Image: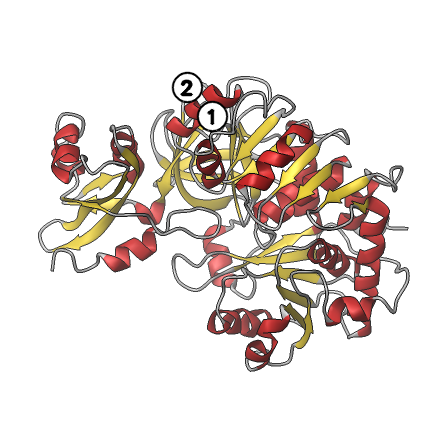
Amino acid sequence: MYHQNTLIARLRAASLDQDTAVFAKTPGRADMRFAELFQGAEKIAAALVSQGVAPGDRVAVQVEKTIEAIQLYLGTVMAGGIFLPLNTAYTTAEIAYFLDDAAPRILVCDPTRQAALAAVARTAQILTLDAEGAGSLTTLAKGFSGFEPVARAGSDLAAILYTSGTTGRSKGAMLSHDNLASNSEMLRDYWQFTNSDVLIHALPIFHTHGLFVATNVALLSGASVHFLARFDADAILEAMPTATALMGVPTFYTRLLADPRLNRDLAQNMRLFISGSAPLLVDTHEQWQQRTGHRILERYGMTETNMSTSNPYEGERRAGTVGFPLPGVEAKIMKDGSEVAIGDIGVLWVRGANVFQGYWQMPEKTAEELLPDGWFITGDLAKFDSDGYVTIVGRAKDLVITGGFNVYPKEVESLIDDLPGVIESAVIGVAHPDFGEAVVALVVANSKQVTPDDIAAALQDQLANFKRPKQIILVDQLPRNTMGKVQKKALRETYADLFG
């Protein structure tokens, strides 16, 4: 019955013959079977249509992670709508921007936020969904049974995801049914997911990683999930003996490594640990392999492209790299209009069925970054090594130009991170009256014995003078977003007046 709705048909296909199999095991709740998952999504789709949702309408969602929120995603797509997930940490003022920009027909939020959001909802009708999966949305949905998904072609939009807005206004990346389905199908095959897999799902679902990688890959393979509301070391370690895979961000792995219960016996049933959304330190790779016997698979993607590269499932998973361009994805590294030589740094461009349709209501920005021939300019600085592995050096906007020389923060950070007693570092450029920008290092250390002078001395013989930090500042922690990415924009703002 789902064949006319491109994404839903493909997400449902793997479980059609295993309706009674468990899709989600959620702590404190009854297991949810595949049939129940999709039947609930149909009811939500019918409820949305009853409230006026028509093909192409946006459904904005700011709710806690529940299985009903997954059904809302599926139900929105079934109804022909465009799913617009929003970070649960966004304030009312931030939500106001998204509502003004996307003009959704429906806003689904936690009941505790309804009053505040009503003031900025404009024309959007508000429905509620709480952390237990209850609310006016699910109450309304109970009155319906069955729904024939609205026909949608592969080129129709299925979702809009807003970028984090690190360089100005957040941009709404428009993702089609084909963008999402093709990328997740390819990941399923590349990472060898089947209906025998059990995935530990502890990622948020307002982000590409948790929603379109973890959820879609599980559905497309007919796999089960341990569905956790958030990262919880106890819950993950408890689930590990009955699971086969974990998708996480670097913070997951560093926190699990800090738990003495993590060992090879606990991880013996696991076949795959995947990391993304932020760079994984080489030290974390090595510690994880030593403790569990498994090599973490690191991959690379963006809101605009889903996943573009991955270390191999079979073959060398090379620490410090994000592997090879995925099947069906082309990648090249460009500088000044030409491809660079192997080993040289430039801006990574990608092209493939995974690449988005453009930025919502921003045609000029779309034209700058998404070229007529399909190439997307990622804005990430990268290089290929002689074996074809891609290394991400940093964001182009994070490049430091000091005294006319280019400094790539990743190079400096890697050297600092390798020093004894250093946990991690972030290197930024700060306005300087003489050099234009000065290199500044923010360092988190696990020992009071580590001093800025020690770090400076260690870098003395490893870096050219212009690359060495003009100031090294010890900090308790680095600011991060919900996916674990260090927020260098916030650091640049904090230290903007460091040199007067």
Are circles 1 and 2 on residues that touch, CB within 8 Å?
A: no
Q: Give the residue at x 83% y 58%.
A: 42
Q: Is residue 328 shown to the viewer in this render? A: no
Dot label at residue 255? none
Gap between marks 1 and 2 measured at Cα: 26 Å
Amino acid at pointer 1: Trp
Q: Which residue is mark 1?
A: 288
Q: Residue 45 in the image: x percent, y percent?
A: 80, 63
Most foreground residue, 100 or 460:
460
Amino acid at pointer 2: Ser
Q: Give the residue at x 77% y 66%.
A: 138
Q: Image height check: is 197 above or below 348?
A: above
Quadrant holding the C terminus? bottom left
Q: Is residue 90 shown to the viewer in this render? A: yes
Q: Give the residue at x 38% y 41%.
A: 337
Most foreground residue, 447 or 227:
447
Q: Residue 295 in the image: x percent, y percent?
A: 51, 23
Query: Could you classify mark 2 by the number of other residues whose Cα lies within 10 Å: few (under 14), some (14-19), or many (20 or more)?
Result: few
Q: Does residue 436 appear to the left or right of 365 in the view shown?
A: left
Q: Which residue is mark 2?
A: 386
Q: Image height check: is 65 above or below 22?
A: below
- When asked about the image quadrant of residue 401, the answer is top left
Q: Does residue 9 appear to the left or right of 476 in the view shown?
A: right
Query: Could you classify mark 1 by the number of other residues whose Cα lies within 10 Å: few (under 14), some (14-19), or many (20 or more)?
Result: many
Most foreground residue, 239 or 168:
239
Which type of secondary structure does the marked residue at label 1 adopt? Answer: helix
Give the residue furthest to the left: 434
Q: Residue 78 in the image: x percent, y percent?
A: 79, 58
- When asked about the image quadrant of residue 217, the answer is top right
Which type of secondary structure does the marked residue at label 2 adopt? Answer: loop
Q: Earlier in the sequence, mark 1 or mark 2?
A: 1
Q: Does residue 469 appear to the left or right of 129 in the view shown?
A: left
